[in-house]
Image (cartoon, helix red, strand yellow):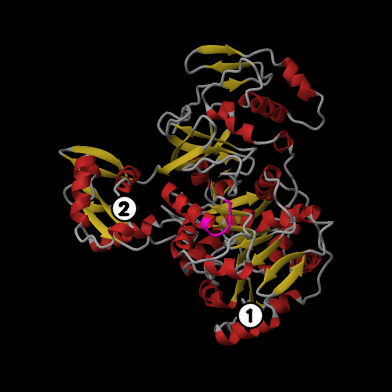
Amino acid sequence: MKIIHNKNIISDAFQKVYFVKHIRLFLLLPINLVMEEYAIMENITEQQKKDLYLRKAALGEIEGWQPTGYPSQDKPWLKYYSEEAVKAPLPNYTMYEYIYKQNQDNLKRIAMNYYGADTTYEKMFERIDQMAGCLQAAGISEGEIVTICMINGPDTVCLLFALNKIGAIANMVYGADTPATLKRHLMDAKSTVVFTLDMFQEKFASIADEANLKRIIVTNITAEMAPMTRIAAQWFKKMKPKALPEDTRFCTWKKFFEKKKLPSRTCHDGETPAVITYTGGTTGGSKGVLLSSKAVNVVAQQYIASEHNYSRNHHWMQTLPLFIAYGVTCSMLLPLAIGMTQIIRIPMADSLNYICKKFKPNYLLTGPAYWEKFADDNEDIDLSFLTAVLSGGDILRQSVEKKINDYIHRHGSDVTIMNGYAMTEVAAGGTLNYPWAYRSGSVGIPTVKSVIAAFDPDTGEEMPYGEEGELCFASPSMMIGYVNNETETKKIMCSHIDRTIWVHSGDLGYVDKDGFIFVSGRLKRYFAYAHNGVHHKVFSIDIEKSLAEHPAVDNCAVVPVADEKSLQAAVAYIIIDNNYKKQTDLSTILTQYCREKLPIEQRPVKYYFVDSFPLTKIGKVDYRALEKMAEESGV
């Protein structure tokens, strides 16, 4: 697709705004005086000067300012940030250097608690250094890709930082994936060394030859637990260590890290590749996303600069797996960069009800599906300990948002759920609804250094405020590219006529005049419907919006199914509202409703009533699984 971006361009001198689209020329008020105010500041870039000016304009502090009407030029969200946040420099260190610099005066505090075992920051850095030396002694060098197929735990965290310290790249894969998928990830990354758990070792044994694996280092999930917890888990939870396969390429974690270590080197380049995380595969195959240290660090730093209530005395619940960017940046790096204590558990093993009763974390971050279940369970739990509750990874519907907030407020807390929106391709740094910048139904405002705008999918022109298009990101946290997939990288990272690289989300949405982002749904979720010789492009989101307006529908998902008469037709999966659970003729009611509301190509030909939707490994609705279910059931 040819990208055309024929609209406002702010000149380098920042004196004029050229409004090409409507062939008008706006001359701003003389801003030399404004810019002189910033010119005397040391260590401030031209971009920061422009952003400080736009912040003042958005606050109404520049008389005569006329907004252009386009989000990427006006940046109205900057009015919600302080001058300090706008001016804050972004860290260009490795991930290891970043957390070390942040915690040099915090070494005695507990960094991680894992099933009763505490690790201080001092012990964590010692462990990282010891691991880094052993990795080097084993011949692992800068730029080598090493696969980590483990579950969240202190060893997983320390190993990731140890690889980063020596300049190696951590390839974070999902142990529950099929051997075929794991083989593809290994071969795409050209990774021959794997650190894994004994519960996954047979998968790697089955693909070791085809994937050309040289070393597989194995540990047990209970190894880092407190002694009594470890014994109980091994005996009562069937987590006893397994014997290694009879293959010389396999060795135990203990044996590998008992080898004589070298003094470990420290990589200092934040721009070099650091970690590979994987997309969710919601509507297509999962892809490896290569991120630099800087990309991961700047996500954490932007949240730290923007939020002033963080405290080292707080506890952060690490609930997200580390094979996704959201887990690496927001669930692991952010609390460590602040200097908090992370409570680490096996992801998704505990309900939010249990977590809140047992641990009383100040910060709790998970996906919409888990928050909704938490509210639906409606347990009588004192939630007064909560400082912030955060949601991400999928759209949080407004009705669900209200349900969650009502539940939290009824149980002793005045916090409101802070839902956000991002992509793996920008290291999970995108938007957030802050307590001081909150709009129900939206996914919040862009992070302070990011720009998000909607573009016409056909022409590439940026859409004005309130008009829907494909949401795109211009961010300092964007990926280096997809692993071994230059074709897909070029499709998603496009240079527009303004010479800015934009990451295309594939999501439909718009930006309102205050800079809040609203997500409508997936651009690519459409199908072809033929009627009377005319082919229609039908978007599932349009059908879902109409169905969601019916009072009997609590939630819905629409997918296509093959149809002899029309090529493809819509089928709808419905979660029924509690007030309509006893209704027996809902199919007839919804069929009549859609006949009145929707054109023929958008009317579902079949309704399936379900208690829940299948979810991907990162907690999003799995539309591919629904399509397969529809295909197996038939029209």
Identify the residue at image location x=68%, y=26%. Answer: 50
Rendered view: 39 above or below 134: above
* Residue furthest out toward the bottom: 235
Q: Residues within 10 Å of mark 2 (few under 14, many from 20)?
A: many
Instruction: Specify few, some or many for label 1: CA neighbours under 10 Å numbering under 14, 14-19, or 20 or more.
Output: few
Task: Name the element at disc 1.
Answer: loop
Q: Is residue 135 left or right of residue 562?
A: right
Amino acid tagged 2 = Val
The amino acid beneath tag 1 is: Thr
In front here: 525 or 547? 547
First reached walking from the N terminus: tag 2 or tag 1 = 1
Q: Is the magenta stretch mostly helix, strand or loop?
A: loop
Viewed as shown, does residue 556 lie left or right of 195? left
Name the residue beneath numbered marker 2.
Answer: 553
Residue 531 spot, x, y in % from top left? 18, 40
User: Residue sitting at 37 percent across and 57 percent down?
Assistant: 624
Name the residue located 60 percent from the left edge and 74 percent from the top edge: 197
Residue 481 seen anywhere in this rendered image of the structure = yes
In the rendered view of the protein, which quadrant contains the N terminus? Answer: top left
Span highlighted in magenta in the image: 410-415
In the picture shown, does residue 219 fall above or below 243?
above
Is 198 left, or right, of 314 in this rendering?
left
**Rounded to the nearest whole Å, what is the CA distance between mark 2 and mark 1?**
57 Å
- Regarding mark 2 in the picture, which secondary structure is present there? strand
How many marks the image carries: the answer is: 2
With respect to residue 387, does 236 lie above or below? below
Are discs 2 and 1 less than 8 Å apart at CB?
no
The disc placed on residue 248 is 1
